[in-house]
Image (cartoon, rainbow, N blue to C red):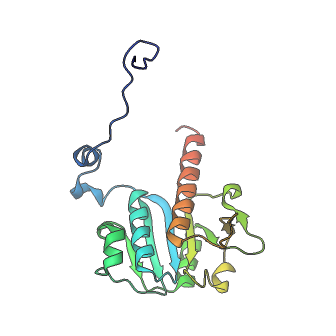
């Protein structure tokens, strides 16, 4: 039996997985991290109480260098076992605020020119893959049971939904957050590449 060879007759090598040391070598020094530029993406959670969801969203915000995370109309327990397991210490690095009023936060972002994007399944919502996200953007997600409150939906510039084609009616909030932040990040990268030089 012969090995598979590519066009230059060199043995094919599978990609090697990066170890912790290699991953850390690609990152900024901890002392300069706080001064690093962040993506102009704000994430607002309207009444998200689940410890695991909160922790997973902190980890998401750290991965994408989200500008700020707002946990509105809720509390945060840094020592909860489920939160600790999901967040993996990222709450130390993600700029965040807890217990604010959602509408007040959104009004502040509106005055600063952020597009307010609410994630909810309702009449007039647009599938996320058709949504025209702009920069800077403020993404709002609702609690696990109640969703985004109607008064918050009313102030949206854009309402997007993640259609569920199966039997369930909704997705986990941290999963939804991941899809929305990734979409915003891609839109941001696309607009940067299309910007005229200079």
Q: Residue furthest front?
A: 1
Q: Residue 119: x, y in percent?
A: 63, 71
Residue 53 figure quarter: bottom left
- Which residue ends up furthest to the right in the rendered image? 123
Residue depicted at x 35% and y 76%? 83
Estimate the x, y position of residue 111 in percent, counting from the top left: 58, 73
Residue 88 relative to residue 125: left or right: left
**Closer to us: 149 or 80:** 80
In the image, 93 versus 76, the foreground residue is 76
Q: Is residue 121 above or below residue 126?
A: below
Residue 137, how many percent across, how many down?
A: 56, 63
Left-right relation of 193 to 3: right
Which residue ends up furthest to the top in the rendered image?
Answer: 8
**Total labels drawn:** 0
Pick the residue in front: 177 or 195: 177
Q: Is residue 175 visible?
A: yes
Picture coordinates of residue 41 (x, y %)? Answer: 50, 62
Q: Classify residue 120 as left or right of residue 22.
A: right
Name the residue: 51% across, 86% down. 101
Q: Can you say which quadrant of the picture contains the N terminus?
A: top left
Say which residue appears at 45% left-offset and 79% top-offset: 71
Answer whether residue 136 is visible to the viewer in this image: no
When asked about the image quadrant of residue 96, the answer is: bottom left
Report the residue at 52% width, 54% height from top. 185
Residue 13, placed above or below residue 167:
above
């Amino acid at each position: 039996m012969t090995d598979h060879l590519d066009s230059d007759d060199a043995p094919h090598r599978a990609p090697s997985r990066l170890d912790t040391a290699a991953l850390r070598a690609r990152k900024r020094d901890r002392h300069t991290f706080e001064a690093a530029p962040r993506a102009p993406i704000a994430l607002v959670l309207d009444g998200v109480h689940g410890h695991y969801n909160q922790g997973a969203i902190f980890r998401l915000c750290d991965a994408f260098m989200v500008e700020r995370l707002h946990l509105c109309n809720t509390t945060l327990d840094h020592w909860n076992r489920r939160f600790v397991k999901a967040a993996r210490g990222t709450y130390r690095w993600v700029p965040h605020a807890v217990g604010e009023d959602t509408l007040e936060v959104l009004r502040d972002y509106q005055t600063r020119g952020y597009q307010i994007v609410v994630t909810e399944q309702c009449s007039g919502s647009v599938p996320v893959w058709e949504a025209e996200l702009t920069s800077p953007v403020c993404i709002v997600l609702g609690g696990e049971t109640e969703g985004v409150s109607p008064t918050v939906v009313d102030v949206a510039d854009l309402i997007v939904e993640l259609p569920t084609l199966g039997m369930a009616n909704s997705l986990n909030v941290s999963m939804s957050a991941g899809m929305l932040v990734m979409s915003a990040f891609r839109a941001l990268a696309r607009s940067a590449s299309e910007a005229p030089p200079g």
